[in-house]
Image: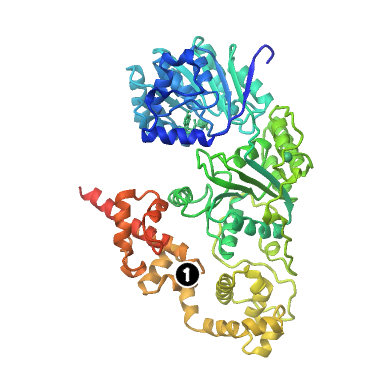
């Protein structure tokens, strides 16, 4: 890269930035006020005006203006800036300024759709071609392109392999070529895509066009590779610093049990704030959500094997602050740009520093302090090795091993985390210590507290999902088959229905007493209860794990629960076993049960039941019943919806009296959405 000037900068959205945007939207800022960042000599050339009139932004961020000018002037471009920094503007504005069509290459349909939709909303003429669309759409896109009707054409890289496609493009004037997620071109990158190699042909096909490449995470080696592969000529380079000062990196090695014992207080610490929890496998996503629910923390799962509507709904519930904790696999997060995420918690070692940086970097996009917590376990290595072993290409497998070694070293090291990340990406920080990572003395409150140890680790026995299952496993709401440590002489099979019943009782007790479930009764004790079915106090005390104290406090309740399960409750449970959660809820509603009762029977929180009922209402499977919501709440909520719209429950909540709950709002909004749909259909 000799002879190339690399500009380095620091990016962080400042509150001034936000204020400026807000003011601009509300029209407080006179259009001529310009920006402090604009150099006066350029003020007259209309770039700022374009920024305002097309994008509605009052001023450029960090280096955007210089980058735009370089691109408008026909320079090639490599821009490395964190996600959310505003890279897209750096091809969009030059494209508009240069005239003609910009060809945008993007690796993922979701990203393409997102960008295209945004440009469309700005009144730009946009088309996209990818495998998720009908052929006729692609054909129309080509027709529009050839007619000179497009400002932006989005394509997937493999499109360039289609015979005649490049020739078709050459028939008209392209404004520039933009390559998003450009690190995918490099085999040294953590997201190498062989199809991106096609892009090296672009220079030959379009020798005169400027090529602009964008990425949020590229090491020095990857940057070199991008320049080389794309055959860039005297490119304008801008590499923002990888030092995200508002982030606090906390790395902690744990055992399976302590991991959950840390996660719960951690999430309590961030209560009311948005958090992402990353889990390595689908099974562990499900288990974690379940565990959190048992601990009284509402969380939604997100992974690739979920039904699309449910996945989307969970994402929306998290985006709209309805549920604050989202537990997902790495499938979650692309294109998600939620500014106020206060923590990203990893439950296992990521595959590379780049991946960690990208995922952890979803915290604190608003520029305020946020925590990136890595709770890793020794066994994570096994899972990583397993994934690496599945890579068939020798060289690629070797590179993956290399990435794993680096992230392992990162996790183990005593050095400043911020510094290690910066160095990894080719920076040489002048400072040695940051003050905001665990190795520089920063420790969150919840980590300082001593970890309570119990005799029989619940999680260790429950979460024995190793060796890793090759195919994604699904959570089925059946009983876990953990083996009790101490086996009685007569190991009678535990009654699964009774066991589920007792678990449910335990969850309720735990919630009432605000303690973890295992504090009430340990799993092994619960199993013994099922096996022995004590019918009086003396028999109860014979059960391992039930001492005088427990018998005293819970004895009567437990005996009652055992008796209850003998008759009515048990029948309901058996019937509802196979049905889907929605079907179960629907049936119980028809039986006239209250949400609380359904919650108890289904062993779910009331808020979960309300969500299910809301989707049932929204999909027209059941009608809203006035007795489900607080008295007089409905007209208040409806009035608020008229003013605020039904998109953000939080806005509605703020517009109604405090006694109106989120549950009330959720149900009425579902009702309104259902009505709207009916009206739209009949209209
Ligand atoms: P990146 O591609 O770097 O991840 P985006 O281009 O998607 O980031 O931009 C992130 C957000 O920042 C978008 O909502 C965009 O509208 C906004 N943005 C970009 N430039 C500006 C600006 N100059 N002023 C205000 N907001 C901006
Ligand atoms: Mg982008
Ligand atoms: Zn540090």
Image spot of residue 588 (x, y percent): 40, 71
Residue lying at 53% horizontally and 81% vertically, measured from the top left = 565
| Residue at the limit of the structure toward the left, as seen here | 683
Residue 34 appears in which quarter of the rendering?
Answer: top left
Q: Is residue 283 above or below residue 103?
A: below
Position of residue 370 measured from the top left corner of the image (x, y, whole percent): 60, 45
Q: Residue at x 63, y 59 (%)?
A: 264
The number of callouts visible is 1
10 Å crowding of disc 1: few (<14), some (14-19), many (20+): many
Residue 102 can be seen, yes or no = no
* Image colouring: rainbow
Q: Percent x, y for residue 271? A: 56, 56
Q: Name the spot of residue 507 as percent of width and height, x first.
A: 57, 70
- Where disc 1 sits, the SS reads helix
Q: Which residue is mark 1?
A: 599
Ligand 1: does it lie within 8 Å of the C-beta at label 1?
no
Q: Nearer the viewer, residue 181 or 634?
A: 634
- Identify the residue at horizontal 57%, vertical 23% (top origin): 79
Residue extending furthest toward the right: 414
Side of 286 where 114 appears, left or right: left
Q: Is residue 334 above or below residue 674?
A: above
Which of 246/259 is in front? 246
Q: Is residue 208 left or right of residue 666?
A: right
Query: In this orientation, does residue 329 appear?
Result: yes
Q: Residue furthest top?
A: 208
Res 480 quadrant in image: bottom right
Query: Is residue 610 depicted above or below 412 in this figure?
Result: below
């Amino acid at each position: 890269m000799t002879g190339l000037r690399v500009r380095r900068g620091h990016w962080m959205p400042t509150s001034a930035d936000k204020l400026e945007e807000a003011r601009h939207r509300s029209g407080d800022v006179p259009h001529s006020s310009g920006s402090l960042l604009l150099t006066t000599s350029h003020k007259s050339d209309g770039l700022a005006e374009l920024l305002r009139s097309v994008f509605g932004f009052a001023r450029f961020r960090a280096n955007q203006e210089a980058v735009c000018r370089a691109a408008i002037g026909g320079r090639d471009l490599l821009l490395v800036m964190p996600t959310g920094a505003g890279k897209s503007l750096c091809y969009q504005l030059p494209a508009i300024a240069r005239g003609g069509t910009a060809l945008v290459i993007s690796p993922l349909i979701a990203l393409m759709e997102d960008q295209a939709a945004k440009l469309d909303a700005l009144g730009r003429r946009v088309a996209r071609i990818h495998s998720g669309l009908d052929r006729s759409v692609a054909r129309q896109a080509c027709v529009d392109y050839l007619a000179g009707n497009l400002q932006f054409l989005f394509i997937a890289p493999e499109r360039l392999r289609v015979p005649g496609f490049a020739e078709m493009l050459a028939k008209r004037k392209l404004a520039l070529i933009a390559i998003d997620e450009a690190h995918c071109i490099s085999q040294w990158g953590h997201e190498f895509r062989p199809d991106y190699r096609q892009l090296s042909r672009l220079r030959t096909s379009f020798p005169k066009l400027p090529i602009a490449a964008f990425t949020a995470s590229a090491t020095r080696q990857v940057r070199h590779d991008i320049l080389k592969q794309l055959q860039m000529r005297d490119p304008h380079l801008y590499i923002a610093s990888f030092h995200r000062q508002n982030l606090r990196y906390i790395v902690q090695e744990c055992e399976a049990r302590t991991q959950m014992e840390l996660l719960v207080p951690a999430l309590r610490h961030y209560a009311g704030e948005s958090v992402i929890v990353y889990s390595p496998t689908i099974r562990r996503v499900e288990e974690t959500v379940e565990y959190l629910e048992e601990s009284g923390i509402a969380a939604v799962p997100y992974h690739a094997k979920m039904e699309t509507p449910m996945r989307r709904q969970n994402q929306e519930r998290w985006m709209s602050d309805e549920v604050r904790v989202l537990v997902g696999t790495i499938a979650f997060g692309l294109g998600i740009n939620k500014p106020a995420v206060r923590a990203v918690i990893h439950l296992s070692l990521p595959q590379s520093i780049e991946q960690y940086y990208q995922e952890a970097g979803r915290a604190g996009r608003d520029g305020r302090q946020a925590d990136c917590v890595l709770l890793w376990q020794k066994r994570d290595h096994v899972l990583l090795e397993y994934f690496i072993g599945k890579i068939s290409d020798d060289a690629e497998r070797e590179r993956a091993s290399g990435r794993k070694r680096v992230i392992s070293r990162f996790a183990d090291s005593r050095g400043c985390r911020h510094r290690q990340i910066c160095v990894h990406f080719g920076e040489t920080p002048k400072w040695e210590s940051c003050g905001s990572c665990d190795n520089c003395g920063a420790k969150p409150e919840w980590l300082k507290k001593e970890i309570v140890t119990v005799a029989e680790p619940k999680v260790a026995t429950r979460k024995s999902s190793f060796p890793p299952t090759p195919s994604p496993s699904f959570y089925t709401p059946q009983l876990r088959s953990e083996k009790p440590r101490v086996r009685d002489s007569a190991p009678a099979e535990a009654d699964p229905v009774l066991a589920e019943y007792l678990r449910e009782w335990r969850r309720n007790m735990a919630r009432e007493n605000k303690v973890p479930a295992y504090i009430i009764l340990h799993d092994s004790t619960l199993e013994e209860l099922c096996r022995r079915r004590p019918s009086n106090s003396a028999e109860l005390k014979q059960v391992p794990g039930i001492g005088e104290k427990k018998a005293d406090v819970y004895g009567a309740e437990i005996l009652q629960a055992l008796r209850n399960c003998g008759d009515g409750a048990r029948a309901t449970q058996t019937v509802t076993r196979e049905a889907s959660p929605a079907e179960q809820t629907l049936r119980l509603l028809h039986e006239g049960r209250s949400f609380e009762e359904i919650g108890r029977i289904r062993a779910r929180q009331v808020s979960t039941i309300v969500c299910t009922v809301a989707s049932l209402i929204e999909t027209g499977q059941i009608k809203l019943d006035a007795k489900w919501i607080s008295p007089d709440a409905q007209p208040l909520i409806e009035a608020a919806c008229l003013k605020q719209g039904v998109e953000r429950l939080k806005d509605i909540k703020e517009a109604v009296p405090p006694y109106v709950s989120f549950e009330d709002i959720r149900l009425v909004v579902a009702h309104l959405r259902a009505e709207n749909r009916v009206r739209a259909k009949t209209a």
